[in-house]
Image: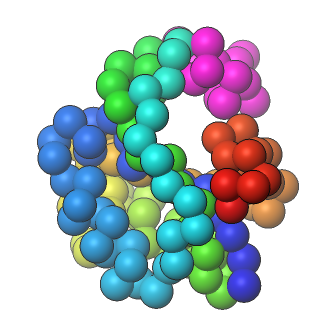
Amino acid sequence: MERTFAIIKPDAVKKGVTGQILARIEAAGFRLCGMRMIHMSKAEAEGFYYVHKARPFFGGLTDFMSSGPCVVMCLEAPDAIKKWRDLMGATDPAKAEPGTLRKDFGASIDNNATHGSDAPETAAFELGYFFRGMEL
C-alpha cells in the first residue's frame, strides 16, 4: 500500500462538487486515511508551494489557494500516487482525458479542481505539511 496527498481545491469546493469528487475517489478504490476542510492563509499557501517560488505563476497560485476553503486528504491504495494522478487527469482540463476529475470539474489550468503529489518524496512532504503523525 502507498499513501499520497490530495487536495480538492477552492474552485471545486466553491462549485459544490466536493461530494462528487469524494465519491469518485472512493469508487476508484482509495481509502481515506485523513481528511479535513481548511482555509489556507497566504503564508501557508506560500509555504506549501515554496518549490515554485521563482516561477511566474507563484503569486497567482498562492492567491488562488488561499482564496477559499479546500479539502486536504491522505489517500491510500496500491500505487496510490500514480493512481491518483491518473484519476485527476492532466493539469490543463482542456487536455485531460474524458472521465478524469480535472476534465469533469476543472475550468482552466489555474482552476483545475484537484492537486496531487507527483512522487513519494513530495507526498511525504505534503502529508507532513497538513497532517501530524498521529492524525494518520
- Looking at the rendering, which quadrant does residue 118 occupy? bottom right
Can residue 122 be seen at all in this image of the molecule?
no
Residue 84 visible to the viewer = yes
Residue at x-position 58% and y-position 23%? 45
* Image quarter in which the N terminus is found: bottom right
Instruction: Pinpoint residue 17: horizontal percent, then vertical percent.
Output: 19, 53
Residue 18: quarter of image: bottom left
Q: Nearer the viewer, residue 24 or 73?
A: 73
- Verify whether residue 95 appears in magenta: no
Q: In the drawing, does residue 59 fall left or right of residue 5? A: left
Q: Nearer the viewer, residue 6 or 86?
A: 6
Q: Position of residue 27 (x, y in %)?
A: 34, 84
User: Relative to residue 39, is residue 19 drawn left or right?
Assistant: left
* Residue 53 magenta: yes
Q: Going by the image, does 55 lie left or right of 112?
A: right
- Magenta stretch bounds: 43-59
Q: Is residue 125 left or right of residue 17?
A: right
